[in-house]
Amino acid sequence: MTRLLHIDSSARPGGSDTQAHGSHSRRLSARFVRRWRELRPGDDVIVRDVGLHPPAPVTGGWIHAAFTPPAQREPWMREALAESDALVEELLAADLVVVGVPMYNFGMPAQLKAWIDNVVRVGRTFGFDRAREGEPYWPMLADQGRQLVLLSSRGDYGYGRGERLEAINHVEPGVLTPLRYIGIDDAHSVAVEYDEFGDERLRASIERAERDIDALVQRLTAERALREAA
């Protein structure tokens, strides 16, 4: 059985296919999970909606607690890290992480950044040792077969690789950099553009993104089936 961790980070509560002014990223992530379940109904899906229920942001006390060895933590430190511990456990249990992430002012929503800050944890998802030869930091989630799918939406267009606005797209790089740092480097992405135009170009972009999602689900499930049969 494969376990999916389905994360949505849009501040909008519903998908654009079911609600007026709904979220395109929620629409895409829901479609991905729905298609996946059609092909693999036995797989488990855990839903984490950080858009509507954001994790608490990191504080000075959180940092103090996280960098204190577990055996030396006081009760207040364990309490400060309780939510982070739960989020880390969800991530560690997942084989595939599916994230709906709209572009807000050229980057990810603050709610998703709070999730990232809670799961990039010294001693849990990355290691650090000043006495270690060479690089003192290392990813603790590397070589575990975990995959990441980013499903995004953008108001303008041309944010893709080699396109007119690539340099100011901080969504995919902003998510991928810290998650690769902890060892999740098998990543795929699909995006809807032209949201602020609301015309035929938006409709065509949504249709293209949905086709790409269907093809991605087909490919990833086929690859997973081959690995399971080996």
Image (tube, rainbow, N blue to C red):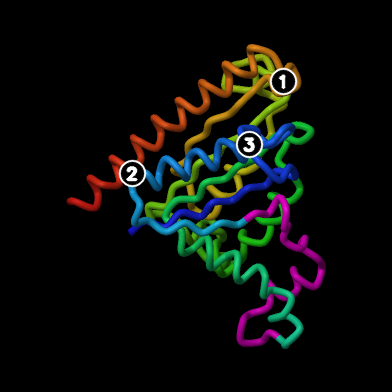
Distance, label 3 to label 1, CA atoms, is 22 Å
- Kindly report which numbered mark, 2 or 3, lies closer to the viewer in this rendering: 3
Left or right relative to 103: residue 42:
left
Instruction: Give the crowd class for mark 3: few <14, some 14-19, many >=20 residues within 10 Å.
Output: few
**Horizontal and vertical percent for residue 148?**
49, 45
Q: Which residues are magenta?
A: 49-73
Q: Quadrant of the N terminus?
A: bottom left
Query: How far apart, in angstroms, are the residues tagged by discs 2 and 3?
Result: 23 Å
Q: Residue at x 42, y 40 (%)?
A: 35
Amino acid identity at mark 2: Leu
N-terminal-most mark, 2 or 3 = 3
Q: Which mark is residue 39?
A: 2
Residue that carries the numbered disc 1 in the rendered image: 156
Can you tell which quarter of the image residue 103 is in? Answer: top right
Sequence order check, earlier mark of 3 and 1: 3
Q: What is the secondary structure assignment of the residue under circle 1? A: loop
Judged by depth in the image, the label closer to the viewer, 3 or 1, is 3
Q: Horizontally, is 204 left or right of 12 in the view?
A: left
As for residue 20 lying within the magenta part, the answer is no
